Amino acid sequence: MQRNWIRAVIAVIFVGLLAVPLIYKRVLSARHSADLAQSRSAALERYGFAFQEVSKAVGINFIHKAPTLDPKLKHIMEQVASMGAAVSVVDFDRDGWDDLYVANSGEGSRNALYRNLGNGTFEDVADRVGLADVNKPGTGVSMGAVWGDYDNDGYEDVLIYKWGKPELYHNDGGKHFTRVTEQAGLPSWVNANTAIWFDYDRDGKLDLFLGGYYPENIDLWHLTTTKMMPESFEYAQNGGRKYLFHNLGNGHFEEVSQQLGIDSRRWSLAAVAADLRGTGYPDLFIANDYGVSELYFNEGGKHFREVGKETGVGYAPKSGMTASVGDILNQGRYDIFVSNISEEGVLVQGNNLWVPEPGTSGNSIKYENMANAMGVELGGWSFGTQFGDLNNDGYLDIYEVNGNVSLDQDQSYWYDYSKVAGGNKAIISDAANWPSLRGRSLSGYQQKRVWINDGAGQFREVSQLVGVTDRFDGRAVVLGDFSNNGALDAVTANQRGPVLFYRNQVTPRNHWIEFALTGRESNRSAIGAEVRLFWNGQEQLQEVSGGSGFCGQNMRRLHFGVGTSTAVDRAEIRWPSGRVQIVNSPRLNMIHKIEEPE
Amino acid sequence: MSGLAPEIRNQQQTAARQRSPLARFFAADNRYLPPAFITLILLVSQLSFGLLESLSRTLLAIAVSMGCDFALALLIYRKIPNLASAYITGISVGILLRSPEFWPYTLCSVLAIMSKYVLRWRGRHLWNPSNFAISAMLLLTPEYVATLSVQWGNTIWPMLIVWALGVLIVLRVKRFHITATYVVSFVVLAWIRTFFTGHPFLAEVAPITGPMYQLFIFFMITDPRTTVKPRWAQCLVALLVAVVEMILRLFENVHAPYYALAIVGPIANAVEIAITTRKRTPVPERLAVA
């Protein structure tokens, strides 16, 4: 009798456990609906900021065109040709207003350079300055662009990386750009999806990292074989090679990757450089699709040592899509964000937020993935992600774009995709084995993520509440203060979709400060310079970046929010040359233009 | 066994004792053989490829499974159970379930073990525990869970080794016919599916080359506790699982093998239980019931 009673109780518990997920989802859904009902002004009041999409009003009318590759890929064209929308921020004419360079990827399509007119609007001047017609048939198509003053003449030059011939353009005084690819010694063909400028040997001249995705001997428009896909969904090492171009200082570059220890054929999608160990030399982090990420410690500018497994970031293979660094807990050191793929019920990789383990530093630094614990794990089919203090509360927030291929909204390619993705090398690596896409979506129409940081280790997703409501296939996102008013606006480039300009309105309660750095002994762009800001017992570290996220580059200036504090103790600037400069009590709510001291 | 003469029984026991430790380990009646094999797969795959979501999640699933089985057996039967099957359940959940969260591993393991004690009919549990729980998780919490989808690295050797070892083990435990029937059925039905989908044969057959299927065919569909008894019926059930899976695949169901086994397995068990009970019941009693 007693045993039957026990059995009955266990049966009730069993049914209860089965019901728990349904009840939990219902409660969450009700709470979310209540949140959505809030007005924009309430969002501004509650979260300290709100976005408004204003691309048309500011003069940005850009629709990305995807390439049409070899007919042998016709059955999966949209899936293969799913990258290329890119955007980067630069003040190319040094007028004090940040401009936007937008990549296009259709054969013969034109890139755009939106010059910021300083009155809240932009004008496309790419044709006029010679940066529009860069996707001529036979030369490949743009995948992105990174800006850096490689010859230290004071004007930002640009590398356009492509599935095709990478092109370097010299900025002639902000008026025109001259193609200098051959003089620079760049390779004839790289199927690249990432490039960054950084001065790895601190010689004052910017060097260039270029990461291949498809192997460089593949011309995607003239395939000799269909066996050009990744050999594995998680362990592929048959991608493009990596290049490290050492700047020789006379407009020439020398390729030194293998010589310096960078020898990988993983499928790179993003790279970021930062001094993760406080050595003064920038380390290199690479997020790879179809496999683990790689972290290269820079050993005095003379050698790179891959330490992915050693540090914990290179163990679990996922689909790395973006790489960005930020000091999210105001600890004075960098955390690393890598976006991955999560699709309900099919593949839940989850993003990685690599936070240094307490008590580890220097060469023994170890990272722990805190994405789950901090609430930034589930994005979608995620691409570009950037850190930035969106509400100026003193903590870095995260903006992530999602969505892969949006075609027929009611039909999904996931079933067929998962069939081959789980198959053996002989099957997955041959495009001929891939089932036809037939107009179906693959993680399409996904909402974006805006995670605000509470400073205590938790992020909250507020995209829909603060006005980020688009469902385009987001690729690159960049943050910049385009109005010079201390608010970080967001610009997103969408595959086969428009460039969106989200203007940010931030509560005046919170204060800010920005630093525009110019190197003298260091590279003029000051890429690699770090600013450590101290205020109200807080310390936040930021670096001038030569490219981050996915196919993106944020504004060069460093932007800090300080919350309601009315004063800052000091800013410590460490220049790439090693020189340290202290700026005591810099004024708030203004841009500080600082040149490296003699 | 109990019907044998004492001297014969003694001879057999003596023979068993005289076997070498290795022979005893690989004996068909060694219930620790499958757990040992699945542990080997787990360790090799994790050390060489990082197959698991994380080792801590898998260990959590194993601990919860064994703990739950121990507690329920003690509570209901007042006896300490052999935890080998709970270990396999935990390790299966730990490998096959993919989630960045920890709670799905706990919930799935608890559901798996509880299903053994709750979903019973006439003294037998109907579902393979891990199959039931993983199917339930996929249906109820698709936002948080998926299943194993990675390969054995990017070469064919690890896959061949696992296949070879797997075959060896199911041969030893006399369940090879189940695995073989399913594999042959899957391959033939994959070929048939190409006529419906228009996809290449290799695309249709691709899933069976992945680790998920190898765990499925070596450990899940061969589970002695939840398969029917006659060999011919075991083959028939394996065939039916493959057929239902094919139907689900034609409807583009990503988790077709799990759901197919979750549908066919308990029906087959229920039919067998009903038939067995009917045979055991004396004729007059049956007539009286009728």
Image: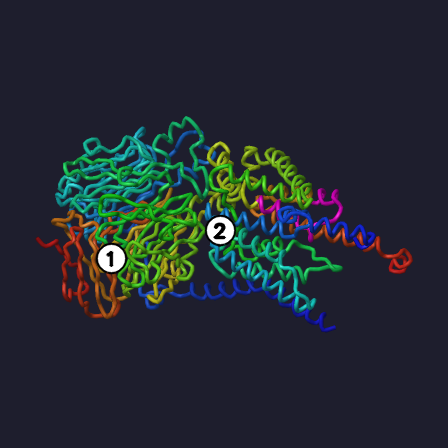
Looking at the rendered structure, which numbered label has been put on residue A289? none
Q: Is residue A83 visible?
A: yes
Q: Is residue A497 left or right of residue A247?
A: right
Q: What kind of element bears circle 1? A: strand
Instruction: Work out which residue is located at the far left of the displayed protein and give it.
Output: A598
Out of A242 and A502, give the one closest to the viewer: A242
Q: Is residue B236 magenta?
A: yes
Magenta span of residues? B213-237
Q: State which chain disc 1 sits on.
A: A
Q: What kind of element bears circle 2? A: loop
Image coloring type: rainbow
Out of A206 and A56, give the one closest to the viewer: A206
Q: How many marks?
A: 2
Task: Provide the residue designation for mark 2.
Answer: B52
CA neighbours of label 2 inside 10 A, class few (<14), some (14 to 19), many (20+): many
For the stretch drawn in magenta, the main secondary structure is helix
Give the answer, above or below, for where A4 lies relative to A450: below
Is disc 1 in contact with disc 2, using a CB cutoff of under 8 Å? Answer: no
Residue A121, x across and y down, in percent: 23, 50
Instruction: Work out which residue is located at the far top of the displayed protein and give it.
Output: A224
- Three-letter code for the amino acid on which mark 1 is drawn: Gln
Q: State which chain disc 2 sits on.
A: B
Looking at the rendered structure, which numbered label has been put on residue A542? 1
Locate the N terminus of chain A by quadrant. Answer: bottom right
Q: Which is more foreground, mark 1 or mark 2?
A: 2
Residue A592, x across and y down, in percent: 15, 59
Out of A203 and A479, give the one closest to the viewer: A203
- Three-letter code for the amino acid on which mark 2 is drawn: Leu
Query: Picture quarter containing residue A570?
Result: bottom left
Q: Is residue A504 visible?
A: no
How far apart in space, not on screen, are marks 1 and 2 (Cα)?
34 Å
